[in-house]
Image (cartoon, rainbow, N blue to C red):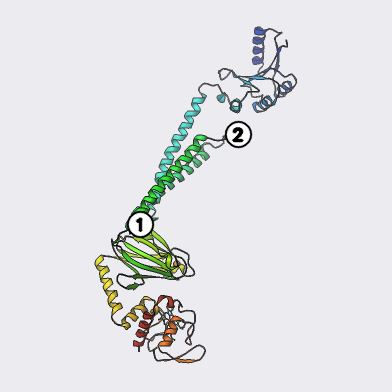
Amino acid sequence: MNARRVLIASANSLFGKGLEKLLVQKHGNQKVAIRLVSSMQETLQILNDWLPDLVILDYDDHTIDKTIFLNRFVSGESEMRVLLVSLQSGGAPLIYDRRMISAQEAEEWLGQSLQDFPDKPNKAGEKKDGGMRHYLIVSVLVGVFTILTYLFLTNAGLLPVQASSQAILIDELFDVHLFLISFFFSLISVFLIYSLIVFRRKTGETEEGKYFTGSSKLEVIWTVVPLGIVLYLSFIGSKSLAEVSRVDPQALEVNVTAGQWFWRFEYPDYGITSQSLTLPVNGQVLLRMTSLDVIHSFWVPEFRVKQDVLPGKNLVKELRFTPTVVGDYTVMCAELCGGAHAYMNAPVKVMEVDDFDNWVNQELAASSSDPEVRGQKFSTEKGCIGCHSLDGKPSVGPSWKGLFGKEEILTDGTKVVVDETYLRTSIYEPNLQVPKGYPANVMPSTYKDLLNEQQVEDIIAFIKTLQ
Ligand code: HEC
Ligand SMILES: [Cu+2]
């Protein structure tokens, strides 16, 4: 029977000699063949040529590069074991079999310093405690940072006043979101910054970091937690959607017409048409909205509700809300709808119920009595007198004073007498007959959509009175 070949690798001659003596005493010269090596070069050489059955490696000896040795050890074909012995750590020696060594064991083996010797009894405990301490610090930091970010966001004035009962519900949703945003922002940035500072590579450290291939625990957590959050959000979202669209049969109806670039509000119960949305406080409003041209969007930020307004008779959209705070607001178009989109605003006035009734009466008085009064009202409301003076003073367009019956010279030199037909044409098609000295394409040509025939007749009646 062949003697067992044992290779002892250590630069420390006492280590090798001592072991050799021990083995020979125990097994006798015939049974074991022993060789001592003290350098990397020699070790690899003999490992190849002599094919020892067992290598005893002095773990405390740094002249033997563990990485190189381990590579050679695991890649060979023949049967071989290695015994790691660390006198300094005092732990029991570890034994590895070339054919059975696991990645985990190989990693343990490579732990470089004395402290990392795999079997050192208090090593595992120490690591764990260190880990727990980091988690504890990070958790506290995340908590503090979350609260600070949340306080900052909720006090930064991101939202205007809550002026409708729907706004309260919707702001609760915003609140939940702001909290989650604060938490995740803090979680990510605290972990990131903490790791950057605390786990920084220190000078002299050369090893690779630990290699992770995956963690089912983490993956379960980061799947289940967001899933729970999303389900919760959809629950509170649908709850408040139901509440926001709750129907009050007493609601005040207003028909809203949007166009490039104006808003028009009609109150079918009163027969009033207005350029501003006037509403009584604390009563539900039902808007029925349609567009004359492209898609617009009705949005009053203080009410927190928003609805696209679509062209087409069968695409009338409804929106309900209950204004709760008396005040002046602005409805804006929230859908990019062309050149003057940014200016597509109209005033919204929320008033006490008494004031609202007064307003209705005033409007009714103005619209009922005589055509000239109505004409004056429309000229103001539709913005005509922004460009046409009533007293003969020059403005963007010709003054209306003395206009009716006057002889007008047009840009092409022809002369016309201003009569009702001329006025009608000038309002519907401003660019057909342009008076001399005035630019074409300045007066809007949208009035054929904005004014009905009666309103145009009323305006003409009003112009006639200005002599
Ligand atoms: C943005 C300015 C502007 C607005 C708003 C405006 N106009 Fe004009 N208007 C003009 C200009 C400029 C002219 C002359 C050039 C032309 O005829 O296009 C004019 C011409 C007219 C004329 C012909 C006057 C003449 O001397 O021949 C009439 C009538 C008229 N506008 C009525 C109205 C009415 C009614 C409204 C409101 C429903 C209105 N305009 C709104 C600028 C405006
Ligand atoms: Cu618009």
Q: Name the residue beneath numbered marker 1.
A: 245
Name the residue at 73% across, 20% down.
46
| Lateral position of residue 426 relative to residue 285, left or right | right
Measured from the top left, where is residue 245 in percent x and y?
Answer: 35, 57
- Quarter of the image where one finds residue 256: bottom left
Q: Amino acid at mark 2?
A: Glu
Q: Mark 2: is the Cβ under 8 angstroms from ligand 2?
A: no
Measured from the top left, where is residue 47 in percent x and y?
Answer: 72, 21
Return the disc, 2 or 1, that comes first in the chain's sequence: 2
Report the image quarter containing ligand 1.
bottom left
SS at badge 2: loop
In front of the other: 345 or 7: 345
Q: Amino acid at mark 1?
A: Ser
CA gap, disc 2 and disc 1: 60 Å
Where the C terminus falls, by quadrant?
Answer: bottom left
Measured from the top left, where is residue 66 in percent x and y?
Answer: 64, 26
Name the residue at 43% across, 75% down.
449
Where the N terminus falls, by quadrant?
Answer: top right
Q: Name the residue beneath numbered marker 2.
A: 208
SS at badge 1: loop
How many neighbours does mark 1 have within 10 angstroms: few (below 14), some (14-19), or many (20 or more)?
few
Name the residue at 49% across, 68% down.
338
How many neighbours does mark 2 have within 10 angstroms: few (below 14), some (14-19), or many (20 or more)?
few
Residue at the extreme front of the image, as rendered: 314
